[in-house]
Structures are given as C-alpha cells and as structure tokens.
Amino acid sequence: MASPPTPRRLAVLLLGVLCSAAAVAAARYAPVDNHLLACGAEAPAVLPDGRRFVPDSGCASTRLRSPAPTLSSAAPPGSPPPPSPLHASARVFSCRASYDLAVRRRGHHILRLHFYPFAPALSASRFHVGAGGLLLLHNFTASSPVVKEFILPVDSDIIVLTFVPDSASTAFINAIELVSAPEEIVGDIGTLVTSAGAAQIDGLSSQVFETLYRITVAGRKVTPFNDTLWRTWVNDADFLVGTDSTNYKVWSFSGRIAYPRGSRQMTREVAPDNVYSSARSVKPGANVTWGFPVPAGSRYLVRMHFCDIVSKALYELYFNIYVNGNLAVKNFDLSSTTGFLAYPYYIDFIVDVEGEGMLKLAIGGLKQSRSDEVSGILNALEIMRMNKTSGGMDGNFPIALDVEYGVSKGIGEFALSLLCGFIFAGLFVTLVMLVLRLRTELRNNGTAWSWKPMDSGEGKLAKAYQLVPSKADY
C-alpha cells in the first residue's frame, strides 16, 4: 500500500503546480493594443475567459464622437437572460457616429463587433460599419446574436470605427474588441487555385479579411477560454457533404503538439493545440468533402491545418488536396514538409467563388500510402472573405464614413485656434519684456554684447557668443 504523502511531498507537488500555472500564464499572448469595450454599459462586464470589458463612456484610450446624443440601452425587465454578459446593454446611434481607438503598435489587428438585438427596435436597425476608411458592413441587420470578426492592417496611431444608420433607421453595437494580432497570423503568400491550375501569389498581408468559418475537424468545440487569441472553433460534422462514413476515421491525440523551435510562422497563436489534437483521415482511393455556404462573387482565403497525429512513422501519408473541385496540391507528403510527427503546418489557398455560393474542400487518399486505412488527414480549417476593393468588403458604395460636426465642430475648432493664438501672443510678449529688461540691466552695469573668437581647448579657434567688458571699463 502506498505511503501517505508527507508535508515535504505536498510542498513539492504544490510548487510544481504553481510553476506549471506560471508557465501557462507566461505563454498567454499579451496584445499591445487591447481595447475591450462594453457599449452602453454602466459597469464592467467580465467574461468566463477572464477578460474584462469596460464601459465605452469612460475609457481613457477611446473617444466616442457623435454630432447628436447617443443612447445607452439595456435589456427590458423580464426578458430572458442574455447569451453573454456583453449582451446586457448596447449603444444606439440615431445619426453617424464613431469611436476613435488609440493604436500603440501599428500592424495587423483583430476587430470583433458583437451584436445582440434584445429589443424589437434593434432588430429593425439597418446600418453600415466602417473602420479606417474601409466599409466593413453594408446594409447590416442583426436578428440574433452574432459576432463579426475582421483582420485588418493598421498604419496609423488611431483607428476610427464608424457607424452610419440607414435612412430613417438606427445603428447599435453591444461590444467592441480591437487587439493587436501576432505577426504570424497573416502571411503574405498564398496559392491561387483556379480551373487552370494553382499558382503562387503575394500581397495578402495588405488585404482585409472577414472570418466566416473556423473549424476543428472531428474535435470538440474550442472556446475563447482555450485559445490564446480568444477565438471559437466549431466541429465539422455539419459541413460534411456526400461522404460515406466508411471512407474516413476519426482520430484523437493525447500527446504533445511540437511547434518548430524559433519559428515565426508556426506558433500557438496560429491555432491552439486543441485543434491539432483531433483529425479526420481518408482511406486510400476515397475522398472526404466539406461544403460551406458563402456569399457568391467574392474571393476567399482558405487556411487548411495539418498535423500528423495518426502515423507511427514518417512518410506514411500521401494525398491530394482539392479546393472547389480543382486540384490544389498533388501527392502531398506532410512528412517531407515538416520532418516530424505531430508538427503543425498550414497552407493558405486563394479561391474565387461564383454561382451558387458554395465553397467545397476535399482531401483524396492515394494508394501509394503505406497504410490501407489511412492516406491523408485534415485537422482544422479557416475560411475568410477578402475585401473586393480598397473601399470596402463588398465593393465601393457612396457611404460617407467621416463624422461631420456641423456648426459645433466649427465653433470648437475656432475656440481652440483662438486659445492657441492667445497663448502664443502671451509667450511672445513675455520674451520681449525679458530681453528689454536684460538690455537695461546690462547698460546700467556698463556691459555690452560683443563677439570675439575663443579657444576651444584644442588649440583651435571656435566661434562663440559671450559677454565681454566694453572699452569704458578700461
């Protein structure tokens, strides 16, 4: 029978637990910019993941601008409990308004907009939302809780988030997140897949992305509590199309996911361990296909995540990757790419979706694989819509995103200019008076301004202004 734990053993165990907790806390991503706003709230809202959203009316790094008063709205008494603490209140705009969010570090940022129409008036709202001069949402309405997430490059010290109500309507927002994104979250190079083949393109880092799907394949839902960037990953079962269950296997991995040491491309910020610890595999000679409804007439970034958690040795898997029915990668050998088992890896594909607005992704097993049961795998995937033009996600629309103040703005700017003028004039008069007083005192003491060369201390003459006695003193 095992001996009871001694105080010394308990102390060692407690120390180990504390060290492990400290290591996890240290590994948690800490964004330089971290705006968390509970709009219209009177008190902070704390989420289960520990994040604290502060009221938007008293945040030092944020300024709310509107030519007309904004309304702070709360869920009516007797209404069902909101899905989230962020849904208990909202900021309502009757005219164009904006938030000025201070940026301490330029680069890519993640913007999440939370909408929950807890009142019929909010459900009837129709409005537009822009950020940094780019129209993100056009003719937007919300009939149920929804989070709109965007990844956008920021090259200024302030990002302006603007809400523009449609004619005879209002706009509203429940909560805002703006956090700095790690550099590795957005690459610059991707593979454009068309019916003519696949080709490498660049320039992706200058685009704006709207997240539509974030999928963990064959795994449990991943909540913001288990993701260093507070993302949500949902299971893929509802998106499998035309796939016989005998063609695939479901895998779960309890070992350690090994990230390349010193790599700037693959870190836990790209995707958490949870999504790499599960996978769906395909048999040799079979296909597994997923289908995702998306708005037609747009270009998409598809990020497919791979991590070999099923092989017993390297070089056992060989498979094809298809994007919208087109061959994207032929004879993909994950081992040659990573060189290790349980090493995560992803590929960014670019695809244009037309017609019915359905984006299909598939992996096809090859008979050259060493196993009769497993030929290829997929662990996770993300689908993001790219901006159509430099003016908006859906194209260019005549929506003015600049907030106008009218007469009040002109009066404010005039008053500020007048105040600055008075301050400058006062400083100038003070300086003149000091100079006149100094000249008077010098004359009374028999000293005058003069110039002469002086020794610089190195045997050379250096020109300098100094006070010297006048001839009257001799």
Image (cartoon, helix red, strand yellow):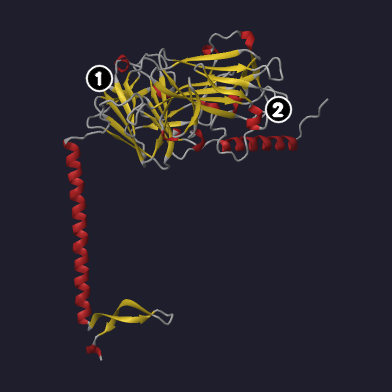
Residue 433, x across and y down, in percent:
19, 68
Determine whether the residue tagged by mark 1 lies in a helix, strand or loop.
Answer: loop
Quadrant location, the N terminus: top right
Residue 175, x across and y down, in percent:
39, 27
Q: Is residue 282 left or right of residue 155?
A: right
Residue located at (76% from left, 31% from top): 5
Q: Amino acid at mark 1?
A: Ser
Question: Is the residue marked by circle 1 packed among few (<14), some (14-19), or many (20+) residues within 10 Å?
Answer: some
Is residue 139 or residue 103 the one in the foreground?
Answer: 139
Q: Amino acid at mark 2?
A: Leu
Is residue 174 or residue 134 the one in the foreground?
Answer: 134
Q: Dot 1 corresponds to which residue? A: 169
- Please identify, in this view, whether the residue under mark 2 or under mark 1 is nearer the observer: 2
Q: Give the total number of marks visible in the rendering.
A: 2
Residue 409, x across and y down, in percent:
20, 38
The answer to whether residue 138 is above or below residue 283 is below
Give how far apart the Cα atoms at labels 2 and 1 are: 60 Å
Residue located at (50% from left, 14% from top): 291
Q: Earlier in the sequence, mark 2 or mark 1?
A: 1
Is residue 228 or residue 225 the one in the foreground?
Answer: 228
Q: Is residue 426 left or right of residue 39?
A: left
Question: Is the residue marked by circle 2 packed among few (<14), some (14-19), or many (20+) residues within 10 Å?
Answer: some
Q: Dot 2 corresponds to which residue? A: 314
View extreme (right): residue: 1
